[in-house]
Amino acid sequence: MTVTHLLYLHGFRSSPLSAKAVKMAAAVQDLHPAVHWWCPQLPPSPRQAMAMLMAGIAGWPRGSMAVVGSSLGGFYATWIAARTGCPAVLLNPAVHPARDLARHIGVQSAWHSPQETFFFQPEFVQELRDLDAGTLSRPERFYTLIAKGDELLDWREMSARYAGSQGQLLEGGDHALSDFETHIDAVLAFLALA
């Protein structure tokens, strides 16, 4: 399968300006300019985010699309992959965001634009519960980059959730995957972009 359409999903409080999103966009543009790239700003509501994404990819060819997701975006990417059957690359993916984000209810600032704020509402926690994709029927269609040094998420939970997936378990590292550029080639190889 050759991927012609690629969706990138950022994490909680993040944006299309995240270092990984920018590096990935540049690599796709430089090496695979024919690929349709979409990295939207996601709304705080998980339900609204999924509605927007599913509408945005409604016309995409299911046999030649893929999704990349970081942190909370990895949780979303898992849901989209389960719905569409497309391959997914997950970068330190959130496994239990309903549990982990319940303590973040209230005003949050955007990571890349601290002056921008949004309100993480209590009902968003249930919306996250509703998006649990369940057991992965085809874990081999997932590629995971999981850092043991992730300071926000437990690498053991990530590894257990995506057992059987392709990818790398990194010694050390951090949640942001600060050395992401050293892994882009492997990610692109898995994606098999046009």
Image (cartoon, rainbow, N blue to C red):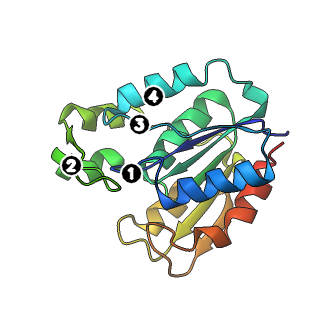
**What is the three-letter code of the residue carrying label 3?**
Leu
Mark 2 or mark 1, which has the lower sequence index? 1
Q: Earlier in the sequence, mark 3 or mark 2?
A: 3
Visible in this render: residue 105? no
Q: Which residue is mark 4?
A: 50
Q: Give neighbour class at mark 1: few <14, some 14-19, many 20+ (Cα, 10 Å).
A: many
Cβ atoms at labels 2 and 4 below 8 Å apart: no
Name the kind of residue labelled 1 in the image: Ser
- State if disc 3 and disc 1 touch (CB < 8 Å): no
Mark-to-mark CA distance, 4 and 1: 16 Å
Q: Is residue 30 visible?
A: yes
What separation in Å lies between label 4 and label 3 (alpha carbons)? 9 Å
* Residue designated by label 1: 14
Q: Residue at x 68, y 32 (%)?
A: 85
State left or right for residue 84 relative to residue 185. left
Q: Nearer the viewer, mark 4 or mark 1?
A: 1
Q: Nearer the viewer, mark 2 or mark 4?
A: 2
Which residue in the rendered view is the most extreme toward the bottom?
A: 172
Q: Are marks 2 and 1 in contact (CB under 8 Å)?
A: no
Q: CA distance from mark 1 to mark 3?
A: 9 Å
Q: Secondary structure at mark 4?
A: helix
Q: In percent of the image, x 75 and y 49: which residue is there? A: 191
Name the disc covering residue 42, or none. Answer: 3
Q: Which label's residue is closer to the chain start, 4 or 1?
A: 1
In terms of secondary structure, where does tag 3 sit? loop
Q: Position of residue 42 (x, y in %)?
A: 41, 37
Q: Earlier in the sequence, mark 4 or mark 3?
A: 3
The amino acid marked with disc number 4 is Met
Using the numbered discs, state the Cα–Cα distance from disc 2 to disc 1 in whole angstroms: 11 Å
Which of the two discs, 2 and 4, labels the residue nearer the N terminus?
4
In this view of the protein, which residue sits in the foreground, 128 or 62? Answer: 62
Q: Amino acid at mark 2?
A: Gln
